Amino acid sequence: GEQVEQRPPHLSVREGDSAVITCTYTDPNSYYFFWYKQEPGASLQLLMKVFSSTEINEGQGFTVLLNKKDKRLSLNLTAAHPGDSAAYFCAVSELNTNTGKLTFGDGTVLTVKP
Amino acid sequence: NAGVIQTPRHKVTGKGQEATLWCEPISGHSAVFWYRQTIVQGLEFLTYFRNQAPIDDSGMPKERFSAQMPNQSHSTLKIQSTQPQDSAVYLCASSLEGWGREQYFGPGTRLTVL
């Protein structure tokens, strides 16, 4: 089955710096990709869904790049602020109409220091 | 929109006792997923319902775990004879029908087995 590797497991940056989190996956049939944010004690908040290859998607304060050729997905927080401190998870949905299950990376704990 | 509702938020059981966890999906969502989150294993898929029918239970431990969706407004996850290794946060998510749809997560139930 699909395996997702997420790096780094911990990331500490100063306010205003950028923070980059990367996931690589193994199954070329993976088609939909998601980024979730989890604040301490809270549930998973959907940040973005992407599915087009080599597409840059811009959200509020972040960009997402998907490179299907390299089977790599990245989240770039462009100017991090303390409110971005949280755990971030990538998730992958395979090309299979019988299940919509997500395979998650192990997460990245981001700390943004003032 | 109240989002996905999970009850209870916290549950403590003694070893060998039964635990039942409840999930109310977002109204209109026909897909319901259960995941488990632990520090060691991360986020793991357990089971998936579509239009109340069980579609994929490939992540469910074969013994002691069962899930049902008796109507479109709630699903239950039951763990019989709970063991300390069952301690985790159990997350329920729902989505609209269709492959690749965004999954929205509930706040989770933190199960502690003493």
Image (tube, coloured by chain):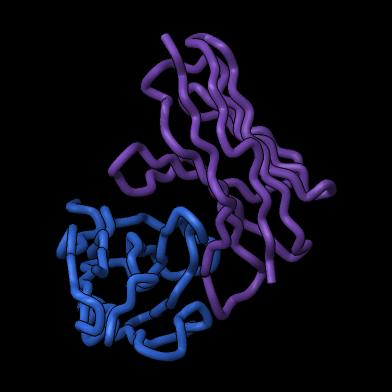
Chain colours: A purple, B blue
Q: Position of residue A39 (x, y in %)?
A: 35, 37
Residue B73 makes an appearance in the image: no
The one nearer the camera, B14 or B86, is: B14
In the rendered image, the quadrant that contains the C terminus of chain B is: bottom left
Question: From what the image shows, is residue A9 above or below residue B114?
Answer: above
Q: Between residue A80 and residue B13, name the one nearer to us.
A: B13
Q: Indicate whether A69 appears above or below B27.
A: above
Horizontal side of B76 relative to A35 (left or right) equals: left
Q: Tell me which residue sits at (77%, 50%) in the image.
A: A71
Rendered position, B60 above or below A52: below
Q: Quadrant of residue B102?
A: bottom left
Q: Is residue A110 left or right of residue B68?
A: right
Residue A30 placement (x, y as % from top left): 69, 61
For the image, the number of numbered tags is 0
Position of B75 with respect to B64 (left or right) is left
> In which quadrant of the rendered view does residue A32 lie?
bottom right
Work out which residue is located at the far bottom of the displayed protein and give it.
B63
Comparing B69 with B39, the one in front is B39
Q: Is residue A65 left or right of residue A12?
A: right
Q: Indicate the quadrant where residue B34 lies.
A: bottom left
The residue at the point 40 percent across, 86 percent down is B54
User: Along the line of sight, which residue is nearer the eye, A72 or A50?
Assistant: A72
Residue B48 at what x, y percent from top left?
A: 43, 77
- Residue located 49% across and 65% down the image: B44
* Residue at the (67%, 38%) spot, across then down: A22
